[in-house]
Amino acid sequence: MSKSVNGSDRIVGPSPHIASSATCTGIMLWVVAALTPAALWAVVNMGLVAVQLLVVTIGVALGTEWAVNSISRKPQTLLDGSALVTGLLLAMSLPPRTPWWMAAIGAFVAIWLGKLLFGGLGHNLFNPALVGRAFVTLSWGGVLAGVQNRGWFATLADVSAEGLDTVSGATRLAVAAADRAASGGYGFDLAAQYQPLLLKNLEGSLGEISAGLLILGGLVLIVKGIIDWRIPAGYIGTMGLVSWAFGSDPIFHVLAGGVMLGAFFMATDYVSSPMSKKGRLIYGIGCGLFNALGRFIGPMPESTTFAILFMNGLAPLIDRLTRPRVFGVVKTDA
Amino acid sequence: MSEWFRVFRQGLGIENPLTVLMIGLCATLAVSTQFQNALFMGLAVIFVLVMSNVLISVFRKAIPSEVRIPIFIVVIASFVTIVDLVMKAFVPSVYGVLGIWIPLIVVNCVILGRAEAFAYHNEVGLSIADGLGMGIGYSTVIVLLAVIRELLGTGKIIWFDSTLISLPAGYAPPSLFLLFPGAFLVFAFMIVGARWINERTEARKEGPACRV
Amino acid sequence: MRNALRLVIPVLVTCVLAAAGLAATYAVTAPKIAEQDRLAEERSLQAVLPDATFTCLEDSRIQADVDAVAAPVDVLDTFYATADGAHAGWALKVSSRGYGGPMVVVIGLDTSGSVTGVTILSHNETPGLGTKVITETWFLEQFPDLEAGFGDADVRALDTISGSTKSSNGVRNAVAGAGRVFSEVLSGLDLSGLEGGSQ
């Protein structure tokens, strides 16, 4: 066995090796700050269950990071803030009544399997929060669907009375998917949903509370230069375009579900997205494309998680395809 | 005898078809959702592997090398079809689940690979050792994989109509382990485990393991 | 020429021996396999319509109608059931698409067309996940609630097993198909040629 990188006298940090004044912790704190309004609004409207979910995921994420680092005698990385962001993002991607143990397992899987097993922050191929969420949805899809309609949403009672079948986790998207499957049309007015989706929507996960607040947070991050506008622009633009091509309402499909959280906060994760500008645009378009395809022809009403995870897997390839123009050729433009 | 045992042991450890050579994974991951199915799959592979190894080794001098592959395939396919028919006749409930995977043993690289790499060049005794070692090595891994997946994914282990082991009632089984991501996840950890064991046991011996 | 023979003869001999071996195995196992298949079918027919005798309808004239009505599922066999000499109902063997491929579902209907029982004859569903349609007994037990004249909408109103939606839908589609076959074809069938069909 060769000596591990950490065991040798020189330590090479993960790419990109670009000198910048922005520290990792600083970036992470900005992301947390941008998410805070939406998280607080969720707590205000959804109540203590939302607090419990946030405390569990963030607590377990931080605890796992600390414990695994301690056991494997690696330097502590708690203060880089990435575990905090992962915990927060995971909470935002789960419905408020997610059982606490499920949220805890999700957070543990996110940090341990999604990040530390790969070698820590910077080495992970996939967005850790989405790995945790994928684990939870694939494992207890039925339970998650069940917790959503335990009388939490008044509006949902009306929908199920109309004869909603197949889909038991009835978010607005699930209702839309069931309608499409049954008749090809929609049983409710999509345009009437714009306002609740933008301002205050109680169906679905914590992060679906308000697309407006997420957009606001995302814009702040773009203005501060923390995330690249190309990823959310490619993502949301493609999502709308494909929805329109499928004959549905593009605005509704962009606002509903996990698109805003995914486009601004999940897909833009530094480590798991491509580095070149062109690559980021391609990556954003890919996320939007697979998210939309998943919604219209996939088995589940929402597919943000798997669209982004899939594109995470492609990110190194996109980098390979888009990088040689910058580094490989003698002709330089820098 | 020691040579026989050395060949036999290779299939179990340092040349395990699944955790080291990593061949024949498709059927393995698909079938290993239930202990019962994995066990029958393992037995079927052991049978086909040993029988085809024996036959090919016995007639290795009579098989011209230009047409050896078609002959191997005919031999293997015949044994697989025999297993197929026998299972259908005597354990129909298992056949119902394994049905589509049994014929695919024909193209499972483990068997053709051993015929080509071992039985064609070695005498019968050693070919039996190789077939048994590889077959048992394959079965051990697939059964262990299935036990982990079934226990975690459904909370119990089933043998036909009876439950062998069952986890406490409060356990909410994560169905991820029954799906392919779970199969890859568990299998990855088994590869880690196998490496660890192989490095420990082989460290005492001379030289690194020969990898095909 | 000699070289060609040197290659052809071993292949030929292998093939002949393999064929002989397989023929022998087949001769031994074939009756056993036929018996197993018959038993399985008999068991599922008895489960959906107890204490009846079944005759497979082999009428090529209705088959075209049945196929047209049943789509997207396939009706493999239609059984005419009698009990104590009188027409007791129908059993349909329907192939439908589940998660892991085709699943064969047997549906029992009484003379009025209400469902008497549903069982699954063979399937390729994921053990522990798709197989919940069998192990979670409430799922199959909700089908006998379907009254005479039920339609697709009534079937869709039944619950599915969360996490096994595709497998559940496979069964529901099969039952809906059987319902259509009854109302469009079987209910209007002239039963006079059949045993106990004079009622």
Image: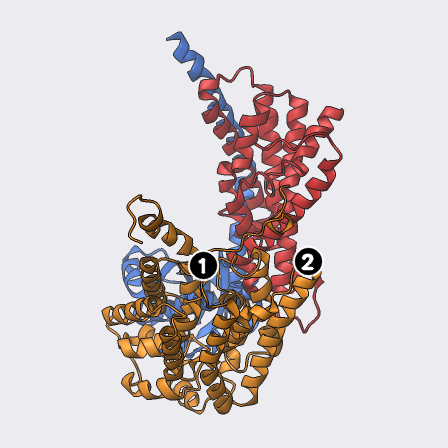
Chain colours: A orange, B red, C blue
- Quadrant of residue A230 within the rendered picture: bottom left
Query: A77 or A86, which lies in front?
Result: A77
Give me the disc on residue C104: 1
Report the chain holding disc 1. Answer: C
- Residue C24 visible, this angle: no
Neighbor class of circle 2 (other Cα within 10 Å; few <14, some 14-19, many 20+) is: few
Looking at the image, residue A207 sits to the left or right of residue A284; the answer is: right
- Please tell me whether residue B96 is drawn above or below residue A60 in the rendered image: above
Residue under pointer 2:
A72
Query: Is there one chain holding both mark 2 and mark 1?
Result: no
Q: As shown in the figure, which amino acid type bears the numbered disc 1?
A: Val
- Quadrant of residue A193 within the rendered picture: bottom left
Q: As shown in the figure, which amino acid type bears the numbered disc 2?
A: Ser
Q: Label 2 vs label 1: CA separation?
A: 52 Å
User: What is the quadrant of the N terminus of chain A in the image?
Assistant: top right
- Quadrant of residue C170 within the rendered picture: bottom left
Report the chain holding disc 2. Answer: A
Give me the disc on residue A295: none
Question: Please, what secondary structure does the residue beneath circle 2 have?
Answer: loop
- Residue C184 visible, this angle: yes
Q: Nearer the viewer, mark 2 or mark 1?
A: 2
Query: A55 or B86, which lies in front?
Result: A55
Q: Position of residue C76 (x, y in %)?
A: 39, 57
Question: Please, what secondary structure does the residue beneath circle 1 have?
Answer: strand
Residue at (38% x, 78% y) in the render: A220
- Please tell me whether residue C1 is drawn above or below residue A318 in the rendered image: above
Q: Position of residue A252 (x, y in %)?
A: 31, 79
Q: Position of residue A333 (x, y in %)?
A: 28, 52
- Please tell me whether residue B151 is drawn above or below residue B125 in the rendered image: below
Residue at (53% x, 90% y) in the render: A47
